[in-house]
Amino acid sequence: MIARLRGVLEGIRADSLVLDVNGVGYLVYCASNYLGRLPPLGSPLSLHIETQVREDAITLFGFEQELEREWFRLLTTVQGVGARLALAILGALGVDGVARAAAMQDKNAFARTSGVGPKLAGRIANDLKDKAPSLTAGLTMRQGMTPSGVRADDAHQQELADALSALVNLGYKEPDAAVALRRAQLGMDSTMAPQARVAELIRFGLRELSA
């Protein structure tokens, strides 16, 4: 199974690129927003790869970031979302847009992608609502992002830190995000499981910040 490729950009197509790795040209399908900002031909290029093996073909899908590959995998777990449509969604919304739409259950955002009707958009939002926040918070914390001004000296402070890290990673200003999350934390059910609390904090914060 191919997980990563590093080589030279040899060709660019409408929905894919050709990467020369030691004389072997790999056809790799990528999101449109990434294909639109590729470096010139002949430039070195490294991609995270998702390999799909079927009876009649081995297909490679390439991503600039590991996080993008993780969202691709999540999207393809939704009934009715194949690999090509998952790439189209990522190309239309970007990683941050997908994360935000999933956390807020914003089916209208998903519906903006060609090929995603209202029913499928609702299914995507519903299926990813609980997976999205834990993925976003978990990856940002593993990447070493520690928001300032948050003390992780007990369980609730750690939940707040995880949620704040996720919101900052999505592009929101830390002071604004912290205020929104503090409001959310006051009304949280203390009996909820930690992961569920983090997910709810992120959803509440996104609603507050997008108002």
Image (cartoon, rainbow, N blue to C red):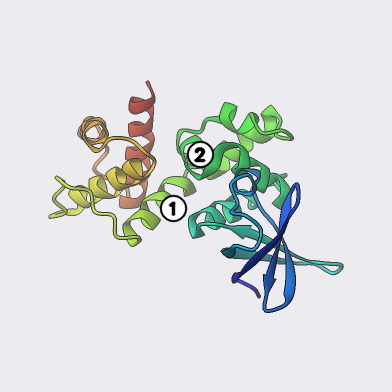
Q: Amino acid at mark 1?
A: Leu
**In the shown orientation, is residue 95 left or right of residue 2?**
left
Q: Nearer the viewer, residue 99 or 68?
A: 68
Residue at x 59%, y 54% (from the top left corner) = 39
SS at circle 2: helix
Residue identifier under label 1: 135
Q: Where is residue 81 shown, x and y percent of the image? A: 70, 46
What is the x, y in percent for residue 197? 32, 44
Residue plotted at (28% across, 43% down): 164
Q: Residue furthest top?
A: 211
Where is 134 relative to 172, above or below? below
Work out how far the residue at label 2 is from the one at label 1, CA to CA, in angstroms: 11 Å
Q: Where 31 sits versus 184, above or below?
A: below
Q: Which mark is residue 178?
A: none
Residue hosting label 2: 102
Where disc 1 sits, the SS reads helix
